[in-house]
Amino acid sequence: MATEELLQFSVASMVENVLQQHGKRLYDIDLASRKAEEAALRRNEAAGWLRKTVGVVGGKDLPAQPSEEEFLQGLRSGIILCNVLNKVQPGAVQKVIEAPSDTVIIPDGAALSAYQYFENVRNFLVAIEDMGLPTFEASDLEQGGKTSRVVNCVLALKSYSDWKHGGGIGLWKFGSVKATASGKQFVLKNSEPFMNSISRTSSSEKSLERSASEQLLLNDFGSENGEMGNLSLNTFVRGVLSDKRQEEIPMVVENILSKLMEEFERRLATQSNQVNAPCSNGSLTPIKSPCSNGTLTQTSAAEMEICTPSTTYEENGPREINTEENMHTVYNNGNLNTQIQRQLFLVEKQHGEIQVLKSTMLLTKADLKNLQMKYNEEINYLGAHLRSLAHAASGYQRVLEENRKLYNQVQDLKGNIRVYCRVRPLHGQVRGFGSVEHLDEGSITITTPSKYGKEGKKSFTFNRVFGPSASQEEVFSDTQPLIRSVLDGFNVCIFAYGQTGSGKTHTMSGPDVLTPETMGVNYRALNDLFLISEQRKDIFLYDVSVQMIEIYNEQVRDLLATDGLNKRLEIRNSSQSGLNVPDANLVTVTSTSDVINLMNLGQKNRAVGSTAMNDRSSRSHSCLTVHVQGRDLASGAVLRGCMHLVDLAGSERVDKSEAVGERLKEAQHINKSLSALGDVIASLAQKNSHVPYRNSKLTQLLQDSLGGQAKTLMFVHISPEYDAIGETLSTLKFAERVSSVELGAARANKETAEVKDLKEQIANLKAALAKKDGEAMRTPNSLSTMSSAGSSPSRYSWQSLNISSDNLEMKNSSSKPKRRSLDLQDLLLSPPWPNVGSSPGSKDYEKEAINGDWVDKVMVNKQDGDRRDSLGSWEDDASTRQSPDTFYQKLNGRNQVVTDDSDELEATTSDSSEQDFHWQSNNAQKASSIPNGIGSKLKRPSLKHARTMEIKSSIPPPPTRRLSTSPSLPKLTGRQAFSADGKRKPLSGK
Ligand SMILES: Nc1ncnc2c1ncn2[C@@H]1O[C@H](COP(=O)(O)OP(=O)(O)OP(=O)(O)O)[C@@H](O)[C@H]1O
């Protein structure tokens, strides 16, 4: 079996390819010229041998190196060919028609020649064919015939002759080549196989003893199928090397050989891949196999492997063998059948295994698909589950939010004090939350490092909890609804509570440098008031005015006093309108900037001192009171809302704050008042009948907000430092108690048209009564009648008369109530109230006040009466009527818990304060527009703007009040006025 047949590619063509791809490219071989050269060499060889064998024929000799034509011409008669053949194989051509001698004249030489040619050539070719040698066509001897075939035939004959001369041992097969004269002999390290091949090939010239396999190899290399045609590998290689220098040859040959090896291996690998490659239908590719019986059969690749010469199987597995060895295995050992059977068995076995593998693979595939399906199902299920969970979670969040709102609403309905907790950031650059372990929207957990486990943790729930990073805006956002309430006629109290340095002033006012972002609740609340009132301007006409007071060392002082000394005030009575300090300056404001200026003034006047806990510690409780009166433009109904914005002084442990001297005194007052606040809260929480409001000025001030029908919000502040944990816990416990206090549902202070009518009727009656009184006064009898009634005639008459005239005036000009205003300039330059004119508390002042509508209020405001006394007895029994002072004293003395049993009138009249007078009289000077807006950056305090503001006062300042600032009077006291030593001189009161 030829190697070419075993291999699925032609070795010759492969060699040629390699030589062409690499040899030709590297050494620029001109194949055509090489072929021509080779053809000439062979021709010369053939001619030489013919000459040598038969000598000169017919007087004509073949040239030693004939051209093609010369060669053909010499042989065209067939005489030389027949003679040579007869020499090699005697008798092969029975009759050779010799050429006529030179002496014989041939009349038609040409015709004779043609005949001779035909006979001789035909006989020669027949004999050659019989011998099994390569033949050619007679026409090949003609001009233009295939010389190579003729040369091939001659050389085959020569080869045969040589073989015969050599003893005719073994099989002969044509294929010998002879080393040309120009062939260079060389020996190359590592090129033994090739050299062997060449040397074997060369020696074949000398010895025809050659193994069949060698012969086959030679045939293979000279395969007619290959593109090399008749060129042998040897010749071809020689051709390639012919123009190389001796020293270049080893490298060139090595390169060619390595390329050959590469190519050989590549092709073997490709063939092996093709053999093993499964068809598209999954079966193994059937390929042509010349195995076993030598016929081409369709067989499997596995079977084909047996025929692949590169691999053989042994017990211990496959072993690589070279082609030659394989040929020996196949042809020389004679074990082909056993081998094939063994390998067939192996193939069968492997086939079986492949089948098993296939089915396993199919099973695995099915399992995988199954798994995939299950996995998909699981994923889908999980996805759906997750979606439902997410839905539930968002629903839960919504429910929580809803719950919080509902909870707040319930609290509103019950009148609970709302409590918002705010955690100050840790001081300095310290990160973290300190003692705050956890906080969320509505709860906070404090951890005590010294305690372990549950013991060390305490949670508190509030309406809202703000962490250290909460902005001023966020903190205010939840407060906004309360601001709206004020405009709807409710009383609101927002107060900041917490230990010193925990951020109360920060929340209520903001830091020292104010920007729109850092402004505190006070500014934002007022700004909102203006915004909403502007939005409602087509429905309501609002008046807004403010007061600002402080409680410093148990003295109430007017922070808007501009005399340089803080005016000392009295908290005379708490009323539902929330005006607890009737004689404090009340300033009408029409824009946020007005408010800012006023608050700056107030802050400047406020008592501030430096302690170890806070270098700008507020040493007083401050209260900014905002009064809002809105008139419904359509119905004429009047709404009165009031808002207290209270920044309490912080509780402090004097050992920590290191307070001494003045600071210590302040601290004691602060702590005492806060403890009084605690008592009030505790008593309210327990629903005690007696609530000790009077124990401190602070509780007196907050009485309405804590015990009345106000909407109250407490911002409780905590410092997250670990060393403040004690204060933090007690603050939060206090706050928790505050949040449990139920105040009762808040009510709007709305005065309907009906109430107005009633008021007017009362006023008319009063006027009629006064008229009667007047008449009676002129009659001695009537005076004695009144005296005998047991009342104080002078006072009563005085009141009645004044009231009646006032009421008449009010009635006649209800839409244009009288009002007196004071420029801020006046306010800033005015001396303290007590020093001039009719000061609060003085008789004149009292008269003036009463001359307003105090009595009117007292008489019509049943609610106050109901709450604290019986309005009926007050109205019905004139003998029990008292002066406003007495009335306040009486009310304060009672301190009863608010009840809800008021009638329509009670619900709609809520104001009994002196300040209502201002409201009623303020309409005429209502601001035509209420601009608002907060300056971009404001410094607190700033008096500059404040001087341009308008201030309204209930009592017209007498000319004598307009004093220029006296150099003898101390300047305004403010934050700057307090040095670290705490020296501050409060103005002595009246
Ligand atoms: N939320 C906050 N963010 C940033 N700084 C804050 C915050 N709260 C408070 N501070 C700062 O902490 C310091 C103390 O705050 P603040 O003066 O408001 O405390 P306080 O409770 O009013 O103290 P005191 O009762 O002594 O008057 C200030 O410098 C203030 O700017």
Image: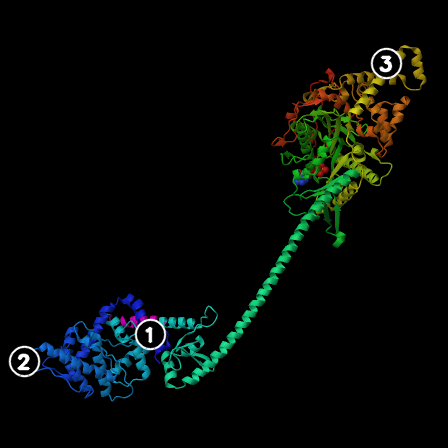
**Picture residue at 14% right of the left edge, 76% below the top:** 73
Q: Give the percent coordinates (x, y) of residue 21.
A: 31, 67
> Relative to 805, is 196 above or below?
below
Say which of 612 and 251 sits in front. 251
Mark 3 is on which residue type?
A: Lys
Give the Cα distance between marks 3 and 1.
147 Å
Viewer-closest of 517 and 218: 218
Quadrant occupied by the N terminus: bottom left
Can the viewer see residue 241? yes
Which residue type does callout 1 highlight?
Answer: Val
Distance from disc 2 to disc 3, alpha carbons, whole Å, reads 193 Å
- Range covered by the magenta-colored residues: 244-261
Residue in view at x 46 percent, y 80 percent: 344
Residue positioned most to the right: 788
Residue holding disc 1: 11
Query: For the point 93% across and 19% down, which residue is it?
Result: 790
- Secondary element under disc 2, as helix, strand or loop, is loop
Residue 771: which numbered mark, if any? 3
